[in-house]
Amino acid sequence: MRKESLSIFFAVALGWAQTPTNDAASMATEAAVFARDATSWLAEGQMTVTDLDGKEQSAERFRIAFQKSARTRARLEITTGANPFIRVCDGISQWNYYTKSNTYIKILLPQFSSCAYPITKMGLLNLLQSSVVAGNERVLFEDRQRECKVLRGQVAPTFPSQTTRTFAACVEPSTKLILRYQIEGEPTSGRKTIFTFTSIRRNPQLDSSLFQFSPPDGSKEIGVISWLDPMARPTKSAVQASNEYFPPNLVSIVAPERTREASSKTIQGTVVFHVEIQTDGKPSSVQVIQSLGTGLDENAAKAVRQWRFSPTVKPLVTVIGVNFQGP
């Protein structure tokens, strides 16, 4: 899978030259040029997901680091909410660590957007159609209320699997910072997602250790997900991951249990499955490709069926390996 074009996905509107406030198209274009000159980003804030009737579904605090280098890298930390986690994309693979269970999993996917989406989705500003400046808002930024102007418009589908979305960004005139943005009509939910930033730094010096995953003490590696494995073959009901159908994010995992028979032996290894991820993010059609026997295959399959992914536009196939370490 090719990496998303930085000119589209990292057109982050953090500043621009003086432009008439009613010329929304020029504002968006100049914002993209400004963003492409940046080499790194560091930001904090809150993500809120609401139904279209305004009922809040979730609110999560996040921290994000992003760096353009020989391999574009990113780190996302969700520090509050029902399922806090750390997600690290090193340019080759992705690592998901779940704080509450002290478990982690490796995802073989050369993609950084899932680790940087609070920043990269602001690039939708550069894709607005019929954009307008739609009033003012006030946002709590760096511990004080700041006034910003709202730039709003429609984002046309990039792929047939997408739908038209509404995008709005609130920009502080004095600093040209995006303090808040929201997306309505995401194809997998139709809900509204709002990102509110409490701090943003452009071109900070970032320690390379931020993009190197080191398993915390006592943590347990649950397994590996390989979206692009040749064994992840499409079925009648599911397709392979591609530039049109992006892999969903892994939301939560469940560790497998050992059987009584296996616990009395030094059986170690990995059970490998071909799995379909349905549009609601639930695994199905969990089929064994590589077996360990002694009941471990069944226990691993039971665990995988309890994993949860973010919603998808279409069912996708993948290969999942579940680890059994020594007793």
Image (spheres, grey):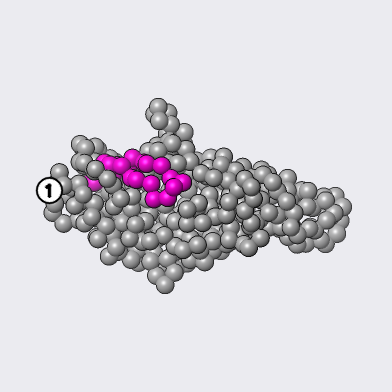
Highlighted magenta segment, given as a residue range: 152-172
Q: Quadrant of residue 108?
A: bottom right
- Residue at the spot 12% in from the left edge and 48% down from the top edge: 20
Q: Between residues 311 and 176, which one lies in front from this camera angle?
A: 311
Q: Is residue 146 above or below residue 229?
A: above
Residue 63 vs residue 303: left or right? left
10 in magenta: no
Q: Which residue is mark 1?
A: 20
Residue type indicated by callout 1: Pro
In the rendered view, does 261 fall on the left or right side of 287? right
Hey, which quadrant is residue 5 in on the image? Answer: bottom left
Rendered location of residue 276, percent (x, y) = 64, 48
Q: Residue at x 39, y 64 (%)?
A: 67
Residue depicted at x 55% and y 59% = 95
Left or right of 89 in this view: 265: right
- The structure residue drawn at horizontal position 58% and vertical position 46%, both measured from the top left corner, is 315
